[in-house]
Image: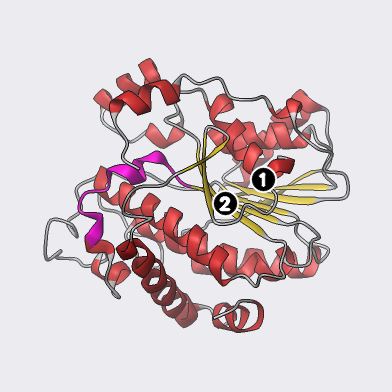
Amino acid sequence: MKMTVWKFLPEQYRTLPKPETYAPSLAGKVVIITGANVGLGLEAAKHLATMNPERLILACRDPKKAQRAVSDIQKVTGVKSIETWQLDISSNASVKAFADKFAKEGGGKLDILIENAGVNVPKLERTPDGWEKNIGVNHLGTSHLAFRMLPHLLQAPQPRLVILASDVHYFTKQPELMNRPDLLQSLNKDKPANKFEAFDGIQRYDISKTMNVLWGRVLARHIPFSSPLTVSTVNPGFCVSALLRDQPIGLRIFASLVGRTTEVGSRTIVHAAVAPQVQGKTGVYFSSCEEAEPSDFVISKAGGETEEKLWTETIRILGKVDPEVPRIVQTYLSC
């Protein structure tokens, strides 16, 4: 599918179902949501709290901000079963520490993992591990956490993994150039070789969101057919959120005119995480609480080839810093 302004604007103004119209009880379930101290993550956490999960873990980089979020959620919902765990998905060490802690203190199974945390960095910045930040956080950090939490997800009866994507993946320039075995390495060069590799602000974010959609699809394909794990990627729509804080004034003004509130955008996340009709629809891209067709590139032959190359390169890179990743892939996933 191609995205045009005539499709984008009506989509922005669609009325989305409120979670209380379909939300099941989450009694006895363990839920983790990353980046839950602000914006979409905070609003999604508020909705999830009302469903009474046994444990709702807010995985956030800043413990003080996370604790304020807990207080805010408890004040609104009255729910007490909310915890804060420190997690910086830009750091391999932090992801490993979080996963190791869950293995000891999480109680075994994980019913829902919502990977909401992400960045939109217009200037060249790097993660603690040396990766360009949009790619290092939005793809590598997200993939790393999913791999490490996979053994716990597979212990739940009907687990779900939700990855926050975006409709900006439709706007990636020359996406066919992603079909290469060294994509991540090429995007991490100090001296890019061409315009696709060059850091030009929004393009790098768009590429990272295309990776989210591709990776959700390829992960779903590598999960054994016998597993009930549902993997989905979600477009929350163009929202007025903290993700815009470093963006040009023109984009922020545009957002004020057509942007969704973070509460409305969060409904798309909650829908993918708990709506009964989503169970089993794995590898699917959702937009406005409905299954949607991703970009023409994603569903093309070249897109399918890119998925497998991205899969292989991601495992190779993460395996160098975390031996648990290839072990988990070999133990729990199909080749």
> Residue 117, position in %: x, y?
52, 48
- Along the horizontal axis of the image, is 143 left or right of 121? right
Question: For the residue carrying disc 1, how many other residues have a C-alpha within 10 Å: few (<14), some (14-19), or many (20+)?
Answer: many
> Residue 189, position in %: x, y?
21, 67
Q: What's drawn in magenta, residue-wise?
A: 165-176
- Give the quadrant of the C terminus: bottom right
> Residue 270, position in %: x, y?
65, 38
Alpha carbon distance from label 1 to label 2: 9 Å
Which is more toward the observer, 293 or 213?
A: 293
For this orientation, the residue located farthest to the right is 28
Q: Which residue is mark 2?
A: 232
Which is more N-terminal, label 2 or label 1?
2
Looking at the rendered structure, the kind of residue marked 2 is: Ser
Q: Residue at x 46, y 19 (%)?
A: 13
Q: Residue at x 41, y 47 (%)?
A: 294
Q: Which residue is mark 1?
A: 278
Q: Residue at x 32, y 50 (%)?
A: 296
Looking at the rendered structure, the kind of residue marked 1 is: Val
Which is more toward the observer, 325 or 132?
A: 325
